[in-house]
Image (cartoon, grey):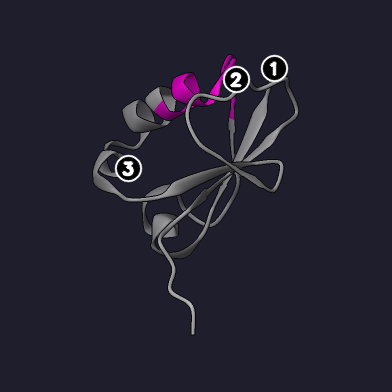
Amino acid sequence: MPVQVIVFGQLTDILGHQPVTMDDAPDTSTLIQQLNQRYPALVNAPYIIAVDKKIVTGNTALTGNNTVALLPPFAGG
């Protein structure tokens, strides 16, 4: 089941500007482990996770064809 990963802000310095497609990620914990292996600099980067435009906390199941966004910290103003 393919999952598309998009990133914003300073995270584009690590993953680039193009979406990344990851296979065989049944949940967000597995997805993050796979991303950390592929992009070691991501391990120390702060971000929150959104699945299909909804911010999630904890491990979340991915059902296939999901879009996962990694969102860096942001400040209002």
Name the disc covering residue 23, or none.
2
Q: Is residue 29 magenta?
A: yes
Above or below, comparing residue 64 to residue 36 in the picture: above
The magenta stretch spans which residues? Answer: 22-32
Circle nearer the N terminus (2, 3):
2
In the rendered image, the residue lying farthest to the bottom is 77
Which residue is found at the position 65% from the left and 22% from the top?
62
Toward the viewer: 13 or 49? 49
For the N terminus, which image quadrant?
A: top right
As measured in the structure, the alpha-carbon distance from the residue carrying label 1 to the one carrying label 2 is 6 Å
Inspect the image, locate mark 3, and give the three-letter code of the amino acid beneath it.
Leu
Toward the viewer: 63 or 2? 63
Mark 1 is surrounded, within 10 Å at the Cα level, by few (under 14), some (14 to 19) or many (20 or more) other residues, namely: few
As measured in the structure, the alpha-carbon distance from the residue carrying label 1 to the one carrying label 3 is 23 Å
Which residue is found at the position 73% from the left and 22% from the top?
64
Where is residue 27 drawn, in percent x and y?
A: 56, 20
Inspect the image, locate mark 1, and give the three-letter code of the amino acid beneath it.
Met
Q: Which residue is mark 1?
A: 1
